[in-house]
Image (tube, helix red, strand yellow):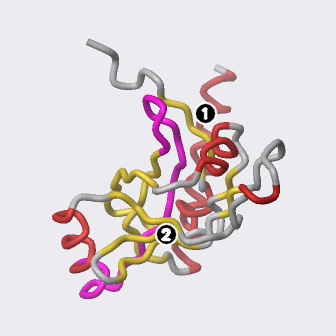
Amino acid sequence: MAKEDDGYKVVSDNRQARYQYEILETYEAGIQLQGTEVKSIREGRANLRDGFALVRGGEAWLMNVHVSPHESAGQFFQHDPRRNRKLLLHRKEINKLIGKLEQQGLTLVPLKLYLKRGKVKVSLGLGRGKKLYDKRETLKGRQAKREIERALKQY
């Protein structure tokens, strides 16, 4: 039997999302893509920074994620870099997300875009926006942790 992380390659990581949101739960979803989009993602030419996900009409959509056009494909076959892409989730997961997004005022943000056994997947985080003082607290904690590690390294 193959290992769990076999064929796992992170293509794009949204580090800004963990700074701006407190992530409560994570979900893994497939993405409905066109051929040139898959080629561009395999080359690592995707950006999740401004992306977000919505649930509309019983379907989940990935919005505002930039996937650069593939260089060697002709103009006719090219895709729109910021087009809306359908997320492939189970019906139970979508219903669960609808309830949490509407009732609790949470946001669905993409955290990672990766290849898993040849398929393009996205890791979605169900998050609550951090206030300014929460962000400062996070930075202070990181800085204190760094200083502790430096002190331990010296001794």
Q: Hey, what amino acid is under mark 2?
A: Tyr
Q: Position of residue 30 (x, y in %)?
A: 40, 51
Q: Give the label on residue 149, or none.
A: 1
Quadrant in the picture for residue 133: bottom right
**Label 2, residues with CA under 10 Å away: few <14, some 14-19, many ≥20:** many
- Per the rendered image, the range of residues in magenta is 100-120
Residue pictured at 28% horizontal, 87% vertical:
102
User: Which of the pair 132/68 is nearer the observer?
Assistant: 68
User: Which of the pair 128/102 is nearer the observer?
Assistant: 102
Q: Is residue 103 above or below residue 112?
A: below
Quadrant of the drawing holding the C terminus:
top right
Q: Is residue 76 above or below residue 119?
A: below
Q: Position of residue 124 (x, y in %)?
A: 42, 59
C-alpha gap between disc 2 and disc 1: 26 Å
Residue farthest toward the front in the current orientation of the protein: 76
Q: Is residue 42 above or below residue 155?
A: below
Q: Position of residue 151 (x, y in %)?
A: 65, 31
